[in-house]
Amino acid sequence: MIILIIEDEKKLSDILKTVLKSERYSVDVAYTGKDGLDKAMKNKYSLILLDIMLPLKDGFTVCKELREHQIHTPIIMLTARGSVDDRVTGLDTGADDYLVKPFGMNELFARIRAVLRRRKTTDSDIVKIANLVMDKKKHEVTRAGKVVALTPKEYKLLDTLLTHPGEAINRRTLIDNAWGPDFVEANNELNVHIKYLRSKIDGDMGKAKHKPLIHTIRGVGFVLKE
Ligand code: CA
């Protein structure tokens, strides 16, 4: 468990580091919003403690940018300002919880445990868009609660599309992930497999119809979106 502390008040970040270490968490520290954002994009943390008033980039922006980059590390915002506005802004930008300074260490630990517990089941093991759910632990895909049986290739293609819902994924990325980087298409394999996948997910072969999720971006690739 590695926790990233993004806090410019040296005294507070030192205390946090010490107490978190005493609870056997590993700790990394950043003193500016910019450095914190860089670290959080590069490394995989279990949780981020994020101050709001920070040099170079404030906590709201850091949080927003992380979520925009599909980094869903749990975030607890720390701030001296306890106004309802801050709280709402924090949660709106994608923070998981909010702690007003000064706070007791027991409260901090309780919040950390609660956020981690809450995140355990929603972490990247389960990916969702509309009523399509991929459970990576079970290696199972469901649409509207019904299990969809996919071949390994179809599963990989869907997994790749699900990494960035709403964003066009180019053909080469899909081929790389499903067949490998050396694969050269001979018989339009990608389109063929996407067609099968689409029929299973969206049901366009006379089966029960769902709202289509897999869309073709002509000349580019495919996108998964509502
Ligand atoms: Ca600060």
Image (cartoon, rainbow, N blue to C red):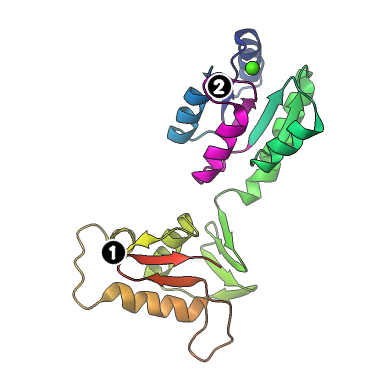
Question: Seen from this angle, which residue lies furthest top?
Answer: 11
Is residue 143 something one can see in this rendering? yes
* Element marked by disc 2: strand
Which quarter of the figure has residue 153? bottom left
Residue type, numbered disc 1: Trp
User: Neighbour class for label 2 at 10 Å: few (<14), some, many (≥20)?
Assistant: some
Residue type, numbered disc 2: Val
Q: Position of residue 184 (x, y in %)?
A: 19, 66
Give the vertical position of 156 relative to 31 (above or below): below
Which is nearer the N-term, disc 2 or disc 1?
2
**Which residue was labeled with disc 1?**
179
Give the vertical position of 70 relative to 111 (above or below): below
Instruction: Look at the image and give the residue range highlighted in magenta.
Output: 47-74
* Figure quadrant, ligand 1: top right
**Which residue was labeled with disc 2?**
27
Is residue 46 something one can see in this rendering? no
Which quarter of the figure has residue 127? bottom right
